[in-house]
Amino acid sequence: MARRSLALTLALVFSATTLAVFACVGWYLYVALAHQVRKQDDQEIVLAARHVRRLAAELASTQDARLHAQRLSSAVLGNQAMAMRIVDAQGATVSAHDEGETFDEPPKPPTHAVTADDVDLSASRAGALVLAPNARIIDTAIREWRSAQGVPVRSIALDVALRNGETVRVGIARDLRGPLELLDSYRDTLWLAGSVGTLVVLLGSYALVRLALRPLRQIADQAREVTAYRLDQPIRVRHIPAELATLVASLNAMLERLHAGFQRLSQFTTDLAHDMRTPLGNLRGATEIALARPRSDEEYQVVLASNLEECERLSRMIENVIFLARAEHPRFEMSRREFDLRDELERIAEYFEGLADEAGIAIRVEGDAQLSADVELFRRALSNLIANALRYTPAGGAILLAVAVRGDSIDVVVENPGAPIPAEFLERIFERFYRVDPSRTQVADSAGASAGLGLAIVRSVMELHGGKVRAESDERSTRFILTFPHA
């Protein structure tokens, strides 16, 4: 299926709108002109009728009217589209005037013109209206009809009282072919102008829309060149319109996120391979040494126990990586419930009591609150922090697990004495596989936090709960603060 052109679609919409506007404006102008022409023609008929009445009213009798027929005809004299006929009470013609039509060049035969004989003065004709001698002559008394030759005519009929009391009937008619031909020509001109104007708008709007969409094509061309190895090159378009500036900014922000994600993924893969190489090297080395010569059962047991520890370390590392990958999935499901923080912290402290006693370290719990969270994830985060604290707390020190309730959040603090962490590393320690001292190897612990993934898991757990984690360190102690929002 062929794709529809946006430029052509917009041009067609503009053209259709323009055609509709032309049609409405043209129709209004045509109606306004027709009304004005009709009003002007009717005004001429009314003025001629008033003039004939005034002249006829000065005559003494019908015979006098016949003698002054030329004077009566002066009301329509000079207007070759008008005809007049005056009859007496018996229907005999008193005065008649017509000069045929002169609108056409050359003029049509007289048989096609409106003549005085065409002026119907019968009051019995359908739609006919004859004004009384004392009636006011207005345009509402004008009637429209067609002559025997089919010529459209508008006329008025009225009775006029002479000075001796006799009455004559006056009929004045106007040929409408001239005005109608004018209106037809005007209508054709409007259609031609509208059609040409619509065509011009179609072509012009198509060209302008294509010009306006040029930055969009440039964006598409640059986006087509984006690859996994060129994510650091933003999209740049000169003279970009304001409507597309937001799109370009969003695309560049997306490229930055993708670039950062690829960088993290690349670094993560490199670090994972590096950290997995150590236990695998230990496994291979210990096995090669064991197989170099025959050994006793006790020596084989030592090698197997060492290999088992390395396998467990690899297993925990893989498990942590899988957890971090699942935690980043938008559909990761949690089982939230409300629980007592102090009871849970004491339960976790009791779990680490054996390791703490062996290291000569005490674990204390302070504070209390109710927290709504996923208990298993909470235990995992706290276990990683306590295991980390046990690793760096000197013998005779104490690890503090404290709860602090604030206005809209609950803080869970894990504090331990020891060497401070430099301020420039406090943010980066939550990155995967990051170590403050790259040359130092971290040993496995009972909580399963190893290879620089423990703190990364803590941050993922907090992000899943809509909270955050931060670290503070000074000469006195190092503090990891978990901030949970109220449910």
Image (cartoon, helix red, strand yellow):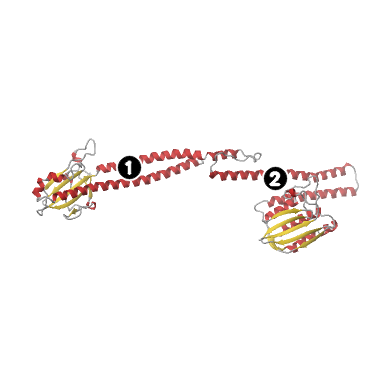
Compared across the picture, whether 119 is left or right of 421 comes to left
Label 2 CA crowd tier, 10 Å (few <14, some 14–19, many 20+):
some
Q: Secondary structure at mark 2?
A: helix
Residue 373 in picture, x, y percent from top left: 69, 60
**Amino acid tagged 2:** Arg
- Where 396 falls versus 5 (above or below)? below
- Camera sees residue 102: yes
Image quadrant in which the C terminus is located: bottom right
Residue under pointer 1: 187
What residue does disc 2 label? 264
- Measured as percent of width and height from the top left, residue 175 is found at 22, 44
Dot 1: few (<14), some (14–19), or many (≥20) neighbours within 10 Å? Answer: some
Q: Are marks 1 and 2 in contact (CB under 8 Å)?
A: no
Seen from this angle, which residue lies furthest top?
106
| Farthest left residue in view | 63
Mark 1 and mark 2: Cα distance apart in space: 72 Å
User: In the rendering, at what x and y percent does residue 57 appear?
Assistant: 13, 51
| Front-most of residues 136 and 319 | 136
In the image, residue 333 sits, relative to residue 116, either above or below, namely below
Residue 283 shows which numbered tag?
none
Residue at 70% across / 45% down in the picture? 264
- Residue 360 position by quadrant: bottom right
Q: What's the residue type where badge 1 is placed?
A: Arg
Of the residues under marks 1 and 2, which one precedes in the sequence?
Answer: 1
Horizontally, is 247 left or right of 62 in the view? right
x 32%, y 47%: residue: 32
Q: Is residue 4 visible?
A: no
Res 15 → quadrant = top left
Please tell me which residue is depicted at 84% across the width and 43% down the height of the picture: 285
As helix, strand or loop, the secondary structure at mark 1 comes to: helix
